[in-house]
Amino acid sequence: MFRSLAARPRWLPALLILMAMTVSFGATMAVRLDWAEIYRKQFAKSPQMDKLPEDQREKAIQMSAKIGRVGAAVAPIVMTPIIYLIITALFWVLLKVGAGSDWSFKTAFAASLHGFAPAVPGTIVGIAVMLASDPAGSTCRTWWRPTSER
């Protein structure tokens, strides 16, 4: 497989599939987690938040929850290619310097992305687990339990 990648390095389909999985995971997490509860617990540990009046504290919690929700859904779109480029650059430099490789960066990027292919089934399972269970304890929303049980 890697010989065919060296001959014709196709990195875009692999990157799009990995990005789709990462964005799907982030979007599922953004929807499933109760971000306000997460930030409420974090702010309870902060002495600065104790000094704020209750209404300002609640506004800060709600604003942080919105940012957390959007960040979990949007950050993978930007961060996924950057992370894969950094990982590829590190390995490419090591192979160039250490092993005298003659691969171009494009070829190394394609091989690196294809090397991450086993993450796809794991991401699908992770999404299924998030949807089917309560992975974050009390901070995870569950639609199948009545409100009184949450």
Image (spheres, rainbow, N blue to C red):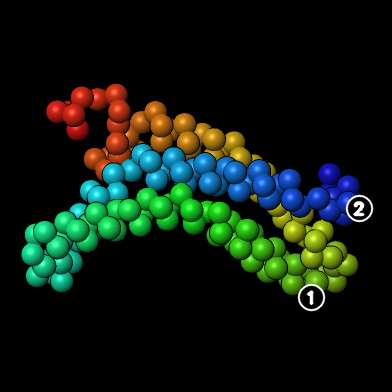
**Label 2 belongs to which residue?**
7
Q: Quadrant of residue 53?
A: bottom left
Where residue 19 appears, x then y in whole percent?
61, 48
Q: Earlier in the sequence, mark 1 or mark 2?
A: 2
Q: Which quarter of the figure is the N terminus placed in?
A: top right
**Label 1 belongs to which residue?**
97
Q: Amino acid at mark 2?
A: Ala
Identify the disc placed on residue 53: none
Q: Which quarter of the figure is the C terminus placed in?
A: top left
Question: Vertically, is 99 above or below 108?
Answer: below
- The residue carrying pointer 1 sits among few (fewer than 14), some (14 to 19) or many (20 or more) residues within 10 Å by Cα, namely few
Q: Left of 72 or right of it: where is 55?
A: left
Question: Vertically, is 136 above or below 84?
Answer: above
How many discs mark residues in the rendered view?
A: 2
Question: Vertically, is 121 above or below 15?
Answer: above
Distance from disc 1 to disc 2, alpha carbons, whole Å, reads: 22 Å
Depth check, mark 1 against mark 2: the one in front is 2
Please, which residue is most extreme toward the right here? 7
Where residue 90 appears, x then y in whole percent?
68, 69
